[in-house]
Image (cartoon, rainbow, N blue to C red):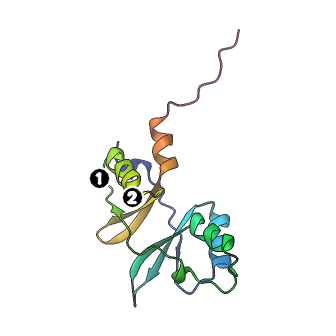
Amino acid sequence: MLVRDAMSTLVLTIGPTHTLRQAARLMAARRVGAAVVFDPDDTGIGILTERDILTSLGRGQDPDRETAGGHTTTDVVFAGPVWTLEDAAQAMTHGGFRHLIVLDGGEPVGIVSVRDIIRCWAPSRRPAPVA
């Protein structure tokens, strides 16, 4: 199975000046665990995850003052839509992260998460037989 078969095409894109509270609200509203942070003037494409927000809060930082740009991972490993799920899982395991931004032609077209991969690899739940 390929990344394009498992990825979420719902990509939340925010700017580096969004506060962490704004980012958290948008992520919660869309029910996603990561946002693509796009800064055309500086780092290009990065990622902000729920773990990044949690780490900031755990340090006692103010989510209304801290910005996405200050907590964005910019040395991102990107996946291609034709990567296998094994390739994506290996990259995640090697890098110690749970999300990959999927690029096609240099543009973000999706995000694949560990949960997406597990969903594809785990057998479907079937109702219990009726006795």
Name the residue tied to disc 1: 82
Earlier residue among tags 2 and 1: 1
**Mark 2 element type:** helix
**Direction from residue 21 to residue 108 in the image, left or right:** left
Task: Name the element at disc 1.
Answer: loop
Q: Could you tell whether 73 is left or right of 75 in the image?
A: right
Residue in the image at 35% along x and 65% along y: 103
Q: Choose top left, top right, bottom left or bottom right for residue 29.
A: bottom right
Q: Is residue 61 left or right of residue 109?
A: right
In the figure, 121 relative to 127: above or below? below
Q: Position of residue 74 (x, y in %)?
A: 41, 75
Q: Which residue lies under the disc numbered 2?
A: 95
Q: Badge 1 local density, few (<14 within 10 Å), some, or many (20+)? A: some
Q: Is residue 25 visible?
A: no
The amino acid beneath tag 1 is: Val
Query: Going by the picture, which residue comes out furthest to the front?
Result: 59
Looking at the image, is mark 2 or mark 1 nearer the viewer? 2
Kind of residue at disc 2: Gly
Residue 39 screen position, x and y as percent? 44, 84
Residue 90 x %, y %: 35, 49
Tell me the quadrant of the picture where the C terminus can be found. top right
Disc number for residue 48: none
Label 2, label 1: how far apart the Cα atoms are: 20 Å
Alpha-carbon neighbours of circle 2 within 10 Å: few (<14), some, or many (≥20)? few
